[in-house]
Image: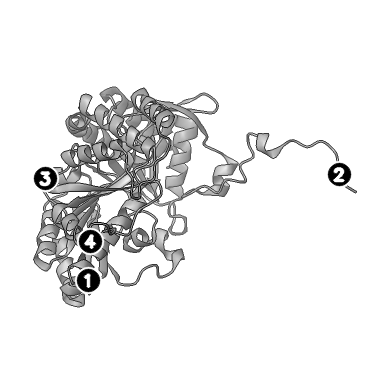
Amino acid sequence: MLDKSPRANPVNVPNDLAAHWMPFTANRAFKKQPRLLAGAKDMHYITVDGRNIIDAASGMWCTNAGHGRTQISSAIAKMAETLDYAPPFQFGIPQAFELASRIAELAPDGLDHVFFCNSGSEAADTALKIALAYHQINGQGSRTRLIGRVRGYHGVGFGGTAVGGIVNNRKIFGSLLAGVDHLPATYDREKQGFTKGEPDYGAHFADELENLVNLHGANTIAAVIVEPMAGSTGVIPAPKGYLKRLREITQKHGILLIFDEVITGYGRLGHAFAAERYGVLPDMLTFAKGITNGAAPMGGVLVRDTIHDAFMNGPEHMVELTHGYTYSAHPLACAAGLATLDIYRDEKLFERARGLEPKFADAVMTLKGLPNVLDIRTVGLTAGIDLAPRAADLVGKRGYDAMVSAFHDNDLMLRIAGDTLALTPPLIISEDQIGEIMDKVGKVIRAVA
C-alpha cells in the first residue's frame, strides 16, 4: 500500500548534504561536521551561523584582492545584462581582446599572446597540447615526451595529472598518458629547513634534466613544466638559480619550458608573475585563480611570439589550432578579469605583497619550536608549516584535524596538504591581521599536539 504520510521535501532540509559529491574533500567526514559558508567580505568568510572566519588561504589561492569587491561584482552584473554569452569560436568580444592585451602587458617581454580557457587545469593541458602541436608543425613530430616534477601539481586534466607528481592525485587513475617522465623534487629538509625565501641549496636538482635527455634523447622531449613555487604540495620555493639553470638546459636542447603560475601569478610572490621575480623567460606561462580574484572561472596560457607565429601559416580561412572550450573568454569572466586588474593596479597590491613579505616571514617563523613543527618555509605572502604525522598509518590526520580545529574552534581558514599547513592570505592583509593569524595558527598547532 502506498505510504501517503507527510514527508519533508529533502531539497528543503538544510542539513541534507547527500546529493553533492564534493571535490578533493573527505566527504563522509565533512558531512558529519560541515564547514558551510554563507558570505565573504574583505579578509573574512561568514559562516551559515554568522561567525567571521579570517581567510588565511585566499579562498583557494585565488582571492588575492580580498572578498566582496563590488567593483568586480558590478562589472559582472553589467556584462550579464549586456551580453550573457558569445561563442568564442570564429566570433569575439571586445573585452577578450582588451583583457588579453592587459595580461600581456603585465607579463615579461616576449610573452605577448594569450589563449583563454576556464581553469588552471585547462591551462596546463592547453600549454602541453600547444607544445606538442608546435613541434609537429616544425617538423619535429618525434618530440612527444612531457616532463613534470615530483611533487608538482598541474591540475586534474589527463595531461596535467600525468605530468603532476603528487602520488595520491595519480595512483588510482592508471597509466594516464604514455611518454611522461619527472624531474626530482627540489626539497631537502636537512639542508633547507626553516628557510625564508628561496633556499640557497638545490640549484643542482635542475641538472637531472640532462640525465633525462641522455636517457630519452633530446629529439623526443617536447616540454618541461614546473611551478616556480610548488604550492599544492605544501609550499616549496624554487632554490636560488634552479629556474635559470632549467632554462639554460631546455634552450640548449630545443625543449620548451612551461611555468605553471596558476598559484604564483598576480602578486602572490610580489610580482605580476614569478617569472619576473626570477628573471627567467619561459616559452609559455599558465595562469588562472587570481586573474578574476576567484569571482568567475578563467584561466589561460601566455605564449611566446615564436610559438604563436609558427601556427600563423597556411590558408587564412583555416583554423590554426584545433583547441578551445565553449566558455573560453566568457564575457562575465572577461569583465571580472578587467575589474580585477584595475584593483591590482590602483591599490598597488603586488608592491604591497612585496613590502609585507619580510614581516610575514618573520611572523610565521615565530611558530618554530611549537609541538610537532618539523619545518617552515616562506616565500612571498605564502608559508608552509610541516607537522609530524600522528603515525605511519595516519599520514594527513594531524593536518586534517588542524583544518577542522582552525575552522570550528579558532575562526580561521587555512589549507592543508597532508600534514602541511599552507598560509596564503589575501594581499590586502594588514600587519595586525598577520599577527592575528599567527596567534590562531599557534593555538591550532597546540590543539592537535
- The residue at which mark 3 appears reads as 109
Type of the residue with mark 2: Asp
- Tell me the CA gap for discs 3 and 1: 26 Å
* Three-letter amino acid code at the position of disc 4: Pro
Residue 341, located in which quarter of the rendered image?
A: top left
Secondary structure beneath label 1: loop
Closest to the camera, between mark 3 and mark 2, is: 3
Few, some or many residues within 10 Å of mark 3 (<14, 14–19, 20+):
few
Q: Nearer the viewer, residue 14 or 178?
A: 178
List the residue tagged with mark 1: 143
Front position among marks 4 and 3: 4
Q: Which residue is mark 2?
A: 3
Does residue 20 appear to the left or right of 373 in the view shown?
A: right
The C terminus - image quarter:
top left
* Residue 101 horizontal/vertical position (percent): 20, 39
Question: Residue 305 has which mark?
Answer: none
Q: Quadrant of residue 296?
A: top left
> What's the residue type where badge 3 is placed?
Asp
Q: Nearer the viewer, residue 149 or 163?
A: 163
Specify the farthest residue to the right. Answer: 1
- Chain-order first, disc 3 or disc 1: 3
For this view, does 144 lie left or right of residue 28?
A: left
Q: CA distance from mark 4 to mark 3?
A: 29 Å
Instruction: Assess disc 1: are there few (<14), some (14-19) or many (≥20) residues with their C-alpha within 10 Å of its C-alpha.
Output: many
Q: Of label 4 and label 2, which has the lower sequence position? A: 2
